């Protein structure tokens, strides 16, 4: 190397074929486009989870009415094995909801002393009978599952055809 060669070229003498193929501006453009694609994918996923109804699927038997004492809950999966749900037996029937909080998907449970569904992650609270938001950050009610106690003493999730 000659004396007119910059110091950095002496210190870093390696050259790569095609090192000028992607400029900094092009790299920044690819970076912004990639981040935008990830953001659009996240928005689409969030919209899908918010708009999806839990009260779909085939009607099926869940549990015998006698197996759930009044004021107690029963955990089950509905409409699919990846959708946790919770049933509460009342004096005059049953109510059931998705067990996923509508804020960030944490698990809700029944607090009998407060007579509410509670999400401990961000202190979200829901009405026992309707699933409507009482307090906290959730903006939508819990996903309700239509239930029916049949003559044979079984509790059925009714669902809606998709």
Image (spheres, rainbow, N blue to C red):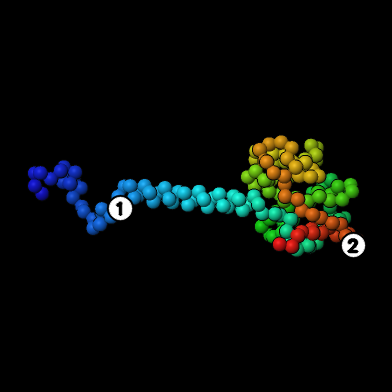
Displayed quadrant of residue 5: top left
Assign a secondary structure to mark 2. loop
In this view, which residue lies farthest toward the right? 151
In this rendered view, identify the residue nearer to me: 115 or 142: 142
Residue 156 in sight from this viewpoint: yes
Q: Is residue 42 left or right of residue 72?
A: left
Q: Quadrant of residue 114?
A: top right
Percent of width and height locating residue 58: 75, 63
The image shows a total of numbered marks equal to 2
Instruction: Tell which circle, 1 or 2, labels the residue nearer the N-terminal end.
Output: 1
Q: Give the quarter of the figure containing the C terminus.
A: bottom right
Using a 10 Å C-alpha cutoff, classify the residue at mark 1 as few (fewer than 14 neighbours), some (14 to 19) or many (20 or more): few
Question: Mark 1 falls on what kind of element?
Answer: loop
The residue most toward the left is 3
Q: Which of 154 and 127 is in front in this view?
A: 127
Residue 8 lies left or right of residue 36; in this view the side is left
Q: Residue at x 73, y 58 (%)?
A: 56
Residue that appears at 67% across and 41% down: 138
Q: Name the residue under label 2.
A: 152
160 shown above or below 109: below
- Residue at 84% from the left image edge and 45% from the top image edge: 71
Q: Where is residue 96 in the image (x, y as percent from the top left)?
A: 78, 51
What residue is drawn where x is 34% and y is 50%? 26
Image: 24 above or below 137: below
Taking the image as shown, residue 142 lies to the left or right of residue 6, namely right
Image coords of residue 48 (percent x, y): 61, 53
Is residue 120 shown to the viewer in this render? Answer: no
Which labelled disc corresponds to residue 22? Answer: 1
Q: How far apart are marks 1 and 2 (CA)?
A: 72 Å
Find residue 154 and report its horizontal and vertical position in percent.
85, 60
Q: How crowded is mark 2: few (under 14 residues within 10 Å), some or many (20 or more)?
A: few
Q: Residue 55 carries which label?
A: none
């Amino acid at each position: 190397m000659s004396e007119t060669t910059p110091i950095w070229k002496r210190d870093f003498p390696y050259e790569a074929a095609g090192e000028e193929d992607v400029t900094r501006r092009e790299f920044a453009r690819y970076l912004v486009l990639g981040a935008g694609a990830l953001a659009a994918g996240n928005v689409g996923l969030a919209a899908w989870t918010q708009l999806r109804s839990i009260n779909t699927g085939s009607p099926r038997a869940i549990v015998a009415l006698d197996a759930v004492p009044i004021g107690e809950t029963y955990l089950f999966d509905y409409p699919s094995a990846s959708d946790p749900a919770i049933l509460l037996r009342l004096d005059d029937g049953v109510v059931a909801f998705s067990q996923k909080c509508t804020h960030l998907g944490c698990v809700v449970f029944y607090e009998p002393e407060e007579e509410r569904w509670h999400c401990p992650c961000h202190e979200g609270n829901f009405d026992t009978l309707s699933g409507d938001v009482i307090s906290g950050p959730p903006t939508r009610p819990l996903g309700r599952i239509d239930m029916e106690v049949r003559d044979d003493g079984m509790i059925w999730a009714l669902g809606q055809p998709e």
